[in-house]
Image (tube, rainbow, N blue to C red):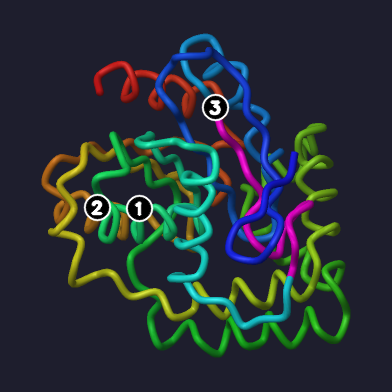
Amino acid sequence: MKIDVNGLKINYEVSGQTGGPWVILSHSLACNLHMWDPQVKALENSCRVLRYDTRGHGRSDAPQGPYSLDMLGADAVGLLDALRIDTAHWVGLSMGGMIGQFLALNYPQRLKGLVLCDTGPLMPDEAQPIWQARIDEARKGGMAARLKTTFEDWFTPELLKQNPPVLKAIQKQFLATPVEGYVGCIEAIRKLNYIDRLNEIHIPTLIMVGKEDFGTPVEVSQIMHAMISDSTLVVLPAAAHLSSVAQPEAFNTALLDFLKAH
């Protein structure tokens, strides 16, 4: 389904238990709401689940960029308002976790709980040339030019060798991402800087990270855990950046335990 939010059409899906606590799932850069397919069935038994395509991704509009994290956060708040969702648990992976930090810092009254997965609070200066190279590569060769190196960042060598069907689904999402949306969102996340404000977050928070995530490594999650007072840290073995895809059972167990506790 699509709904008008902030001058663009946002694609979303709602499922699960009517009257259950709302759980909002926010995907990674260059994926879409179907990134969460391995989680939905586990959540639907007890929760009302909202998945959506971030601006520039999936079936949502992809206006010309650059975008900003404030803009992506405003889209999220606008979506909640449009669907008349007062409060919810936010589950965000990578870019989705950055949007979650924005909400926790600027709209804490809208969140019952915060789940930050394979994400960070700061984009260091040394990462800027890397992001620019990714932009240049995508503009020159399309999303296919970014596929191999991205998958090497997202998944362990063992999982890539096994090549389960779920990887084909993620590949399809990646290649279908509009270059304008990919670049627009890179421009947003490359300016990420919430590191000095993390101690302002007092919402119950679960931090999850793949043990082999070298993009947002365990050490970054440990820093976030130390700075967010009411937080729990879970490290998922045999997983890299897309830990929810690589280790769905362990991910879902930790997520459901957190939701039941809060």
In percent of width and height, residue 241 lies at: 54, 51
Mark 2 against mark 3, which lies toward the viewer? Answer: 3
Q: Earlier in the sequence, mark 2 or mark 3?
A: 3
Q: Position of residue 187 (x, y in %)?
A: 57, 80
Q: Residues within 10 Å of mark 3 (few under 14, many from 20)?
A: many
Asked whether, in this view, residue 199 is left or right of residue 29, the answer is left
Q: Amino acid at mark 3?
A: Val
The kind of secondary structure element at disc 3 is strand
- Which quarter of the picture shows residue 140? bottom right
Q: Nearer the viewer, residue 192 or 70?
A: 70
Three-letter amino acid code at the position of disc 2: Gln
Q: Which residue, given by chain and number where applicable, does mark 1 sit on?
A: 218
Residue 45 position, x and y percent, is 53, 9
Total number of numbered discs in the rendering: 3
Residue 231: say if magenta.
no
Residue at 34% from the left image edge and 23% from the top image edge: 259
- Tell me which numbered mark, 3 or 1, is placed earlier along the sequence: 3
Q: Quadrant of residue 132?
A: bottom right
- Asked if the residues shown at circle 2 and circle 1 are in contact, with their CB atoms under 8 angstroms apart, the answer is yes
Would you say residue 57 sits in the magenta stretch? yes
Estimate the x, y position of residue 34 in percent, counting from the top left. 71, 38
Question: Judging from the image, what secondary structure is the residue with disc 2 in?
Answer: helix
Label at residue 222: 2
Q: Classify the position of the C terminus by image quarter.
A: top left
Identify the magenta region: 50-62
> Which residue is tagged 3?
49
